[in-house]
Amino acid sequence: MDGLPFWKMHGLGNDFVVLDARERPITVHPDQARRIADRHRGVGFDQLLVIEPTQTSGADVFMRILNADGTESGACGNGTRCVAALVMADTGADALVVETRGGLLECRTAPQGGVTVDMGPARLGWQDIPLAHEADTLHLPVSSGLLTDGVGVSMGNPHAVFFVPEAEKVQIDGVGPVLEHDPLF
């Protein structure tokens, strides 16, 4: 991986390392992803995005997504916007379709600048998220501090959404790992 060109990109608070494997295959093993993700000894990222050729009709590229722990993810809207911006700048296109494990995502240049992504409809079925067992996805039995009564949804990967009157009062640090390691997920 030494000497491999990459882009460091940011989208709405998420940060990404992007590798372009359209011309030359790149294999990233989970342990390599974890080392690159290390914010003290590596580059640091929320997700590593690998742009690859697609074999799917109607798609322009395939985007492989690796989380900081080395696991693969199905989709990421902010990451898709970053990859689409790179590919559109490279090809001159103003629209393209990015294939992910979570499905095909339509991307367009936004009138005000940037890129928009159609993530498709939210999936609310417990099997679609997926949860470990059947549960009411509109009232998840999980909590963290002030966050209770969450909603489970998949946009290609699992999300827990909490509605709060004042977001500024919620201590968000540490919520992700608590929910990520909850047996329901």
Image: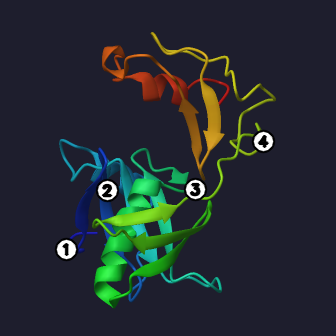
Residue sticking out furthest to the top: 145
Dot 4 falls on a residue whose secondary structure is loop
Disc 1 or 3, which lies upstream in sequence?
Answer: 1
Of the residues shown, which amino acid type is indicated by label 4? Gln
- Crowd around label 4: few <14 · some 14–19 · many ≥20 (10 Å): few
Earlier residue among tags 1 and 2: 1
Q: Reading the chain from its start, which is encountered first: label 4 or label 3?
A: 3
Say which amino acid is labelled 1: Gly
Label ID, residue 16: 2
Estimate how packed mark 3 is, as few (under 14), some (14 to 19) or many (20 or more) residues with alpha carbons within 10 Å.
some
Question: Which residue lies at the image location 47% right of the left edge and 63% below the top edge?
Answer: 117
Count the marks: how many?
A: 4
Query: Is the N terminus in the top left, top right, bottom left or bottom right quadrant?
Result: bottom left
Q: Which mark is residue 3?
A: 1
139 vs 2, nearest the viewer: 139
Q: Which residue carries the number 4 mark? A: 127
Graded by Cα atoms within 10 Å as few (under 14), some (14 to 19) or many (20 or more), the crowding at tag 1 reads: few
Q: Please tell me which residue is depicted at 40% across the width and 76% down the height of the picture.
A: 26
Marks 1 and 4 in Cβ contact (< 8 Å) = no
Q: Quadrant of the C terminus?
A: top right
Give how far across and how far down residue 54 sits, in percent: 56, 82
- Report whether 168 appears left or right of 136: left
Q: Position of residue 104 (x, y in %)?
A: 60, 69
Q: In whole angstroms, how far apart are the C-alphas of marks 1 and 3?
A: 28 Å
